[in-house]
Image: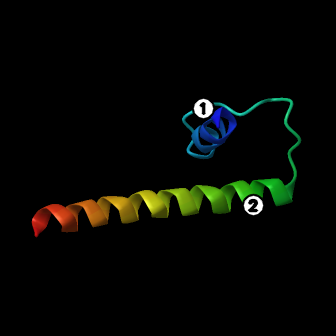
Amino acid sequence: MKSIWRQILQYLYIRKRDPSEVKNTNTKLMHGMNRISIILFLIALIVMLIRLFRH
């Protein structure tokens, strides 16, 4: 479970990446897509909470 949170923090640039990690184009694209999906999920949660408290 710790590794999942560590990876999410790396996607959001809160934690630095491991310098020994292999870097290639496919990995960069995958991390970029994961970053976008996490951000959209957080935005959706915020919108749902706002709608919940408004009604």
Query: Label 2 amino acid?
Result: Leu
> Most extreme residue toward the left, as rendered?
55
Location of residue 47 (image quadrant): bottom left
Quick one: SS at disc 2?
helix
Quick one: SS at disc 1?
loop
Is 4 above or below relative to 16?
Answer: below
How far separated are the C-alphas under marks 1 and 2?
Answer: 18 Å
Q: Which mark is residue 29?
A: 2
Q: Which residue is mark 1?
A: 15
> Most extreme residue toward the front, as rendered?
1
Q: Quadrant of the C terminus?
A: bottom left
Is 38 above or below relative to 55?
Answer: above
Disc 1 or 2, which lies upstream in sequence?
A: 1
> Which residue is located at x 47 percent, y 62 percent?
41
Is 14 above or below relative to 35?
Answer: above
Q: How dense is the environment of label 1, judged by Cα within 10 Å: few (below 14), some, or many (20 and up)?
A: few
Residue 19: give x, y in percent of width and height: 80, 29
Q: Camera-side residue: 37 or 29?
A: 37
> Which residue is located at x 56 percent, y 61 percent?
36
Q: Camera-side residue: 11 or 5?
A: 5
Q: How dense is the environment of label 2, judged by Cα within 10 Å: few (below 14), some, or many (20 and up)?
A: few
Q: Which mark is residue 34?
A: none
Q: Is residue 54 left or right of residue 12?
A: left
> Which residue is located at x 84 percent, y 60 percent?
26
Q: Is residue 8 left or right of residue 42?
A: right
Query: Label 1 amino acid?
Result: Arg
Q: Is residue 51 left or right of residue 44?
A: left
Residue 12: give x, y in percent of width and height: 56, 45
Is 34 above or below relative to 10?
Answer: below
Residue 31: give x, y in percent of width and height: 70, 54
